[in-house]
Image (cartoon, grey):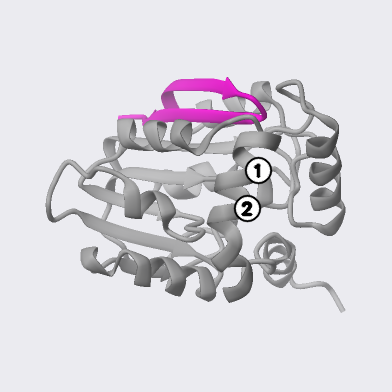
Amino acid sequence: MKANPTHSTRDQAWAGQAAYNKGTLSAYDFFVLGFSNRFLWKCPTRELLTHYNSHLSANHLDVGVGTGYFLDRCRFPSSAPRVALMDMNPVSLSFAARRIARYQPETYTQNILRPIEQPIAHFDSVGINYLLHCLPGSLDPGDKACKAVVFSHLASLMKPGASLFGSTLLQGHGGMNRPAQALMTFYNRKGIFSNASDSLDNLKSSLEQSFCDVTITQVGCVALFSARIKK
């Protein structure tokens, strides 16, 4: 019997999401955004929030929502923004939605490695923070298992001139210290991360296939990127 590629893709993608349950999400802000960002990845969370605020619109989709930390603390350019959440993990979706309930967010359960077939009104900005390094595959555009397919999927939800922005961890960059390298290796071995071959060049090439005005800045182990949908 032939394997079902849809199930295979979902199972591989789920490996990077399965760790996010109610317990780990409750500790996420402290351990990842508080400790790991500052002392291991060498990119304080305030850098991510500044990047977030500089590209955010009042018609925004967040993909790979985590705890909803950035949506909770960001500065929307409107007092009544349209905010949507997209994730394949219903626990993360529920956690983030409760945190930003004041915005009455739309929620969409979606494996972003698969084409988006849900009827969704388009957005002016899309955020994809700390998700790419959790997705299976590589960022090499020549790889059959290239996870950069997510960029073309997201482009289908964006208005002309809309902005995509986000961040991802790159292994082996930014003068990684031994504890950081050990944790990164452990996460890759467990399938929580899949970024062993991710590079700045591959990230840039992958973004340029679907977007223009690509900008990438590296802070420690973190690549902060932004781009605009091709008109």
How many numbered marks appear? 2
Going by the image, does 163 lie left or right of 180?
A: left
Q: Mark 1 points at which residue?
A: 36
Amino acid of disc 1: Ser
SS assignment for the magenta stretch, majority: strand
Q: How crowded is mark 2: few (under 14 residues within 10 Å), some or many (20 or more)?
A: few
For disc 1, the neighbor class at 10 Å (few under 14, some 14 to 19, many from 20) is some
Q: Look at the numbered disc 1 and give the secondary structure of its residue.
A: helix
- Is residue 97 in view? yes
Quarter the N terminus occupies: bottom right
CA separation in Å, label 2 and label 1? 6 Å
Q: Position of residue 20 (x, y in %)?
A: 62, 67
Mark linked to residue 207 = none
Task: Name the spot of residue 135 as percent of width and height, x first.
Answer: 67, 52
Quarter of the figure with the C terminus = top left
Question: Quick one: which residue is furthest to the left in this view?
Answer: 79
Amino acid, disc 2: Phe
CB atoms at circles 2 and 1 under 8 Å apart? yes
In this view, 43 is above or below 91: above
At a point 58% along the width and 23% down the height, the residue shown is: 219
| Sequence-wise first label, 2 or 1 | 2
Residue drawn at x 41%, y 68% as measured from the top left = 108
Quadrant of residue 204 within the rendered picture: top right
Answer above or below: position of 61 versus 229.
below
Which quadrant of the view contains residue 14?
bottom right
Q: Is residue 146 magenta?
A: no
Determine which residue is flagged by label 2. 31
Task: Specify start and end residues of the magenta stretch as a single range.
Answer: 211-231
